[in-house]
Image: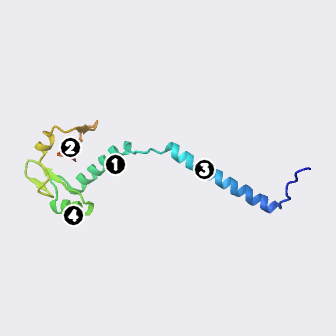
């Protein structure tokens, strides 16, 4: 006995080809995204934090406009401290001063440019911009 394939119309065959091609295309796109994406995008963290720091310093100014700095701290839900020769300013009185942060024996990650560092003080990370 000979096995006969059913006669399908050209329209059904075309729909099957488009459907199978769509599934294969989705699988290929997902595979490419999985292969090229980084699971932990830490390589962008340095660039992002650097741009954020520069933007904050530009917006606030030197010496800082404390009203604008306070507004930025509230908008971004961050805390900030300025230490300079004329005066010191802090958005929150609980932020440690620069000397205690830098003297903490906790681990420190230095960026190559040495413009800023990320220091850990009492288990909390602090970005110090010089």
Q: Residue furthest front?
A: 1
Of mark 3 and mark 1, the one earlier in the sequence is 3
Name the element at disc 4.
helix
Q: Nearer the viewer, mark 4 or mark 3?
A: 3
Of mark 2 and mark 4, the one earlier in the sequence is 4
**Which residue is disc 2 drawn over?**
120
Observer-nearest residue: 129 or 107? 107
**Which residue is disc 1 drawn over?**
48
**Which residue is disc 3 drawn over?**
27
Residue at image point 25% right, 60% down: 77
Q: Residue furthest left?
A: 86
Tell me: 10 left or right of 28.
right
Name the element at disc 2.
strand
How crowded pointer 2 is (Cα within 10 Å; few <14, some 14-19, many 20+) is rated as some
**Which residue is disc 4 drawn over?**
71
Q: How is the image coloured?
A: rainbow
Observer-nearest residue: 112 or 17? 17
Of mark 4 and mark 3, the one earlier in the sequence is 3
Q: Residue 63, position in %: x, y?
A: 14, 53
Q: Looking at the picture, does residue 129 appear above or below residue 77?
A: above
Name the element at disc 1.
helix
Q: Classify residue 98 by image quadrant.
A: top left
Of mark 3 and mark 2, the one earlier in the sequence is 3
How crowded pointer 3 is (Cα within 10 Å; few <14, some 14-19, many 20+) is rated as few
Q: How many angstroms separate mark 4 from mark 3 (CA)?
A: 47 Å
Q: How many angstroms separate mark 2 from mark 4 (CA)?
A: 26 Å
Q: Nearer the viewer, mark 3 or mark 1?
A: 3
Q: How many angstroms separate mark 3 from mark 1 (CA)?
A: 32 Å
């Amino acid at each position: 006995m000979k096995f006969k394939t059913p006669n399908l119309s050209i329209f059904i065959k075309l729909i099957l080809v488009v459907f199978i091609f769509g599934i294969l295309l989705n699988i290929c796109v997902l595979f490419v995204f999985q292969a090229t994406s980084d699971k932990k995008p830490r390589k962008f963290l340095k660039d992002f934090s650097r741009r954020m720091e520069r933007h904050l310093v530009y917006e606030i100014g030197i010496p800082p406009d404390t009203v604008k700095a306070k507004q930025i701290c509230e908008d971004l839900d961050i805390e900030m401290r300025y230490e300079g020769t004329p005066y010191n300013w802090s958005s929150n009185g609980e932020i440690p001063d620069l000397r205690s942060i830098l003297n903490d024996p906790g681990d420190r990650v230095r960026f190559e440019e040495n413009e800023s560092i990320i220091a850990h003080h009492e288990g909390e990370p602090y970005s110090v911009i010089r």
